[in-house]
Image (tube, grey):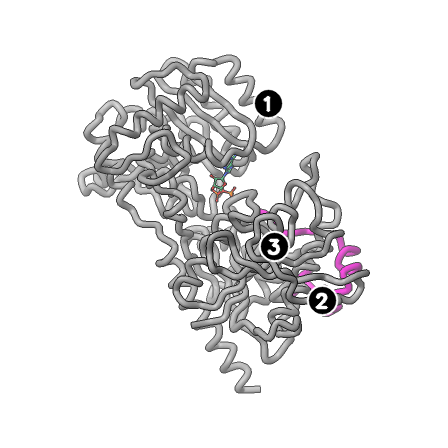
């Protein structure tokens, strides 16, 4: 069993903006349940401080260049025995709202300094220099906000093994060269073989260049990011590191996302009692002020309103759906241009389109439970969680064939239907026409109730539990630790 320091910028239930928080809350817990000694480390945002249980200040760190000291607050993730370390430095993290953006939706101006501070505190804990009398065997970093850690640890010896997980390669933490200089990092890191990326400083390269192992959140995305189409300019580096790069699919938290016990939905149901699902549909239609109708196929969407998610394709396809008995229930927030366009579409077609702008955890559950089908026309999708929730809630996913969507949804082709493998509808081009054809195909299946029930029942029986994925991470930790040990023995 290993000692694991898991570093992240968000984790449920302390703070969440997206899928990273779901993973960072659930994976460390699964590793802890498998007998590992895990500490989950993240910034002490006000929301996180408020929710942390049994908080105690356990260390005070002095980081060169910082006026004042950084406190480490140790506590428990709510209602669990998982240890959490919050990095408390008020000028950096004591702010309301989003961990990354100000009230206007712009990145905080000092994000580089804030996440470099998180990395420096993590380095101290990793090297047992924080006064905790605890040194991890492995340090697991997630996304650009934590990617400096492997770079800072690289030259230490002996040191813990490092693993870096890419949750979304499109977010890289790019800053001007002056920022690199201001952070007082070692000059050797200013090179194209280190953190420099076409004249800018790239946080994510810290993880991609220096981590002992790299993972991403589906096998398909691990292959895709080695191509120019999905590699965001980093495909060459990722191909170079292909021997240590692999994909491990995310699980879902089956306690939170279970239609049989979910306290947030109108009526609980299971694959044996699917008829209760229609009460949830009825409730959802009312919530979105849509006509209550069994005959209409109700399609849900929950997510960030950005181009990645294909929200523009959904907007364009609406005009073609108005002569079909189809309704849309859309929840999300993001770029104003998409929010406005969708709200206008809802005003124009109030009987068919319901749009709610905002972030609403309970409503997200109600959409999964009450919709017949769920749309995910993402242009790229490292793993995607909503299609996994949809499968579990008997809600047919309609997805673009990319990343984790391709790995987790099996298209309702005649062959797959015959073999009872089909779980959803898959389309192959991120275009309005292909999306429309996929929706129409789903509608044809909807009109064949026996086939529809067969397909959603197959989906509901799929397993996406965290335990299986956590065991795969443990194998990788072991491989990385073994490799480290043999390097250190040879020096
Ligand atoms: P990403 O991390 O790219 O945003 P994922 O599909 O991996 O996408 O995870 C998104 C998570 O955030 C899911 O749990 C989803 O239900 C949730 N989510 C996204 N937008 C909203 C919203 N507006 N209200 C409630 N939950 C949301």
Q: Earlier in the sequence, mark 1 or mark 2?
A: 2
Is there a contact, CB below 8 Å, between mark 1 and mark 2? no
Q: Earlier in the sequence, mark 3 or mark 2?
A: 2
Question: Which mark lies nearer to you, 1 or 2?
Answer: 2
Magenta residues (range): 170-195
| Residue found 34% across the figure and 22% down from its top | 297
Position of the C terminus, as image quadrant, is bottom right
| Residue found 53% across the figure and 58% down from its top | 76
| Residue found 25% across the figure and 36% down from its top | 455
Q: Is residue 172 magenta?
A: yes
Tell me: 467 left or right of 57.
left
Q: Based on the displayed image, in which of its 4 quarters is residue 56 positioned?
A: bottom right
Is there a contact, CB below 8 Å, between mark 3 and mark 1? no
**Mark 3 neighbour class, 10 Å CA radius: few under 14, some 14 to 19, many 20 or more:** many
Position of the N terminus, as image quadrant, is bottom left
Q: CA gap, disc 1 to disc 2? A: 46 Å
x then y, percent, for residue 186: 74, 69
Above-or-below relation of 448 to 364 = above
**Mark 2 neighbour class, 10 Å CA radius: few under 14, some 14 to 19, many 20 or more:** some
Above-or-below relation of 150 to 217 = below
Tell me: 280 left or right of 126.
left
- Identify the element where label 2 is drawn: strand
Which disc is residue 340 wearing? Answer: 1
x then y, percent, for residue 84: 55, 59
- Identify the element where label 3 is drawn: helix
Above-or-below relation of 262 to 445 = below
Residue that mark 3 sits on? 144
Which disc is residue 61 wearing? Answer: 2
| Residue found 45% across the figure and 17% down from its top | 289
């Amino acid at each position: 069993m290993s000692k694991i320091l898991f570093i992240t910028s968000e984790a449920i239930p302390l703070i969440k903006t997206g899928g990273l928080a779901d993973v960072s809350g659930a994976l460390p817990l699964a590793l802890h349940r498998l007998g590992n000694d895990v500490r989950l480390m993240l910034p002490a945002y006000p929301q996180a401080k408020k929710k942390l249980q049994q908080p105690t200040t356990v260390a005070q760190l002095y980081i060169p260049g910082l006026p004042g000291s950084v406190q480490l607050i140790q506590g428990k993730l709510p209602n669990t025995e998982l240890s959490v370390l919050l990095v408390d430095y008020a000028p950096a993290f004591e702010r309301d709202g989003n961990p990354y953006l100000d009230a206007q939706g712009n990145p905080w101006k000092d994000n580089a300094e804030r996440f470099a501070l998180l990395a420096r505190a993590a380095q101290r804990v990793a090297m047992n220099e924080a006064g905790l009398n605890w040194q991890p065997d492995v340090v697991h970093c997630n996304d650009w906000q934590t990617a400096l850690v492997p770079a800072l640890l690289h030259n230490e010896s002996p040191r813990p093994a490092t693993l870096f997980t890419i949750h979304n390669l499109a977010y890289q933490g790019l800053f001007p060269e002056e920022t690199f200089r201001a952070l007082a990092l070692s000059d050797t890191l200013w090179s194209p073989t280190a953190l420099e990326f076409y004249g800018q400083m790239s946080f994510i390269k810290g993880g991609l260049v220096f981590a002992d192992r790299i993972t991403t959140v589906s096998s398909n995305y691990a292959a895709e990011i080695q191509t120019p189409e999905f590699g965001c300019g980093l495909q060459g580096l990722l191909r170079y590191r292909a021997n240590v790069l692999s994909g491990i699919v995310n699980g879902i938290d089956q306690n939170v996302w279970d239609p049989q016990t979910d306290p947030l939905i109108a009526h609980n149901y299971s694959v044996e009692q699917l008829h209760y699902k229609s009460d949830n549909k009825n409730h959802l239609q009312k919530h979105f002020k849509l006509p209550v109708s069994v005959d209409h196929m109700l399609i849900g969407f929950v997510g960030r309103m950005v181009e990645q998610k294909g929200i523009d394709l959904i907007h364009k396809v609406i005009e073609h759906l108005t002569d079909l008995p189809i309704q849309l229930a859309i929840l999300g927030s993001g770029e104003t241009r998409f929010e406005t366009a969708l709200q206008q579409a809802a005003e124009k077609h109030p009987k068919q389109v319901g749009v709610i702008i905002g972030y609403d955890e309970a409503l997200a559950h109600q959409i999964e439970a009450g919709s017949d089908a769920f749309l995910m026309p993402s242009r790229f999708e490292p793993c995607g969680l909503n299609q996994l929730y949809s499968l579990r809630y008997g809600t047919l996913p309609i997805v673009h064939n990319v990343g984790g969507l391709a790995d987790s949804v099996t298209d309702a082709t005649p062959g797959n239907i015959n073999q009872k493998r089909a779980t959803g509808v898959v389309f192959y081009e991120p275009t309005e026409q292909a999306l429309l054809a996929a929706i129409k195909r789903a509608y044809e299946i909807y009109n064949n109730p026996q086939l529809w029930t067969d397909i959603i029942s197959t989906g509901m029986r799929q397993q996406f539990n965290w335990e299986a994925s956590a065991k795969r991470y443990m194998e990788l930790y072991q491989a990385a630790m073994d490799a480290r040990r043999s390097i250190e023995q040879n020096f």
